[in-house]
Amino acid sequence: MTRHERRELQRQQRKGQAANQGRRRTFSRALTWAAVVIVLGGAVAGLVALANKSTPTGAVDPVTDQDWTKGPKDAKTVLIEYSDLQCPACRAYLPTLKSLAEKNADKLLVVYRHFPLKQTHRNAELAARFAQAAGKQGKFWEMHDVLFEKQTEWSSEGDPKKLFIEYAASLGLNTDQLTQDADSATIKQEVEGQYQSGLRAGVDATPTFFLNGTRVKNPASPDDFANTVNAAIAAP
Amino acid sequence: MTLPTPSTPPSPPRKWVLFAILGTAFLGFLDATYLTVAFYQRTPLQCGLLGGCDVVTTSRFATVGGVPVALLGSLYYLTLIFMVVAAHDLKRSAFLRIAARLTLVGFVFSLWLTGVQTFVLRAFCFYCLLSAASSTLLFILSFFLPVWRRGRREPEPVV
């Protein structure tokens, strides 16, 4: 091998080494980024799965003794309403619900659960607590009716407590006890518990109705809704 | 606040700082992403420690122009992670400088959000406080990066 050839060979080798190194470096860079993407992607997938586990199953909690009900406990048709006392749409359903309950007093169980939309209705939660507290004195439905009927009067009130107490007095409730109960941790928990059960059931608007455990999909009007309920009652 | 005295020429950032930033940002990313996913899926938060999660995450402060703050947080932590990895990969300190400035933004935003929880909503959510803590830690860690102390006029070091 001549000197020239030897030099040429060395140059070739060095070139090869450099290329090798370059390849190795590219590989390690790709590995780094792949690891980052895999770890982050895996984390996101894991979190989505975790959230899915506690995502609304759509299944509504069964009726218990804690619930406010109208009608026979063993009725074949059960209508559960998640509602907000400050929501105008809920108010619009009041006459329909009342007449449904009256006409089918022996066949339909109507259940009311609180779902105060605290974000948009600032007095809704307090109203729910007052209704709940009235229930302690055996007049939940009476308070529920008054609050819906006078909704426009107290909705935009800065301090609606006074009005609530007025309504309660007209129903013959013990207002001192009522005010105390409405502020109690028990009542707060009861309202929150119903709200949470609504979230679990996938409630995202009020009113949301569950007819025999199945969510009633956006009824066009209260009349349309009444037809759906009547059909369920009439079904064999 | 006194910054660490500059060493000349600017040394490359210590490894532990980069790993600490990566780890903290990853934790923040998990936290914020959980909140983001919960926001879009309307999942009730698993909120045992302090309660009040729903009050905070459904308040009017939880979104900025329709975009949930949690999503902004996720993107913030994600960007930080990418900046640190890019700085390591491309050996460019510019990425670290961007990262350091971002931590300042994140810190100020966290202060505001914690203030809102304390004084306006009077309710705390564990996940939001966790994110505030990680943003604060990231801001502190950024002082260990050799990027704050360089004046603008000084020439870029040749790495």
Image (cartoon, rainbow, N blue to C red):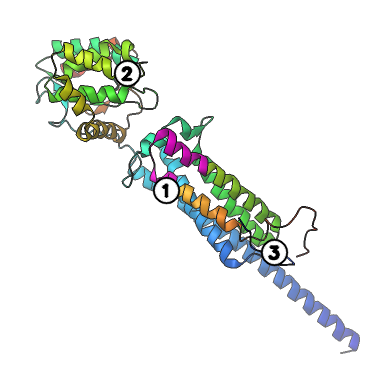
Q: Is residue A80 visible?
A: no
Q: On the picture, is B135 further left or further right than B151?
A: left
Residue B119 on the magenta segment? yes
Q: Main secondary structure of the magenta part?
A: helix
Query: Closer to us: mark 1 or mark 2?
Result: 2
The answer to whether one can see residue B65 in this image is yes
Residue at left offset 39%, top offset 41%:
B124
Could you tell which of marks 1 and 2 lies nearer the N-terminus?
A: 1
Q: Tell me which segment is drawn in magenta.
A: B111-129
Q: Nearer the viewer, mark 2 or mark 3?
A: 3
Q: Residue at x 15, y 13 (%)?
A: A171
Mark-to-mark CA distance, 1 and 2 = 35 Å
State how far apart marks 3 and 1 are (Cα).
41 Å
Kind of residue indicated by mark 3: Pro
* Residues indicated by labels 2 and 3 sit on the same polypeptide chain: no
- The answer to whether residue A91 is above or below residue A184 is above
Rendering coords of residue A58 (x, y %):
30, 34
**Residue A47, which numbered label?**
1
Per the image, the residue denoted by label 3 is B6
Q: Considering the numbered disc 1 on the image, is that residue within a helix, a strand or a loop? A: helix
Distance of label 2 from label 3 (alpha carbons): 62 Å
Q: Are marks 1 and 2 in contact (CB under 8 Å)?
A: no
Q: Which of B80/B7 is in front?
A: B7
Q: Residues within 10 Å of mark 1 (few under 14, many from 20)?
A: many
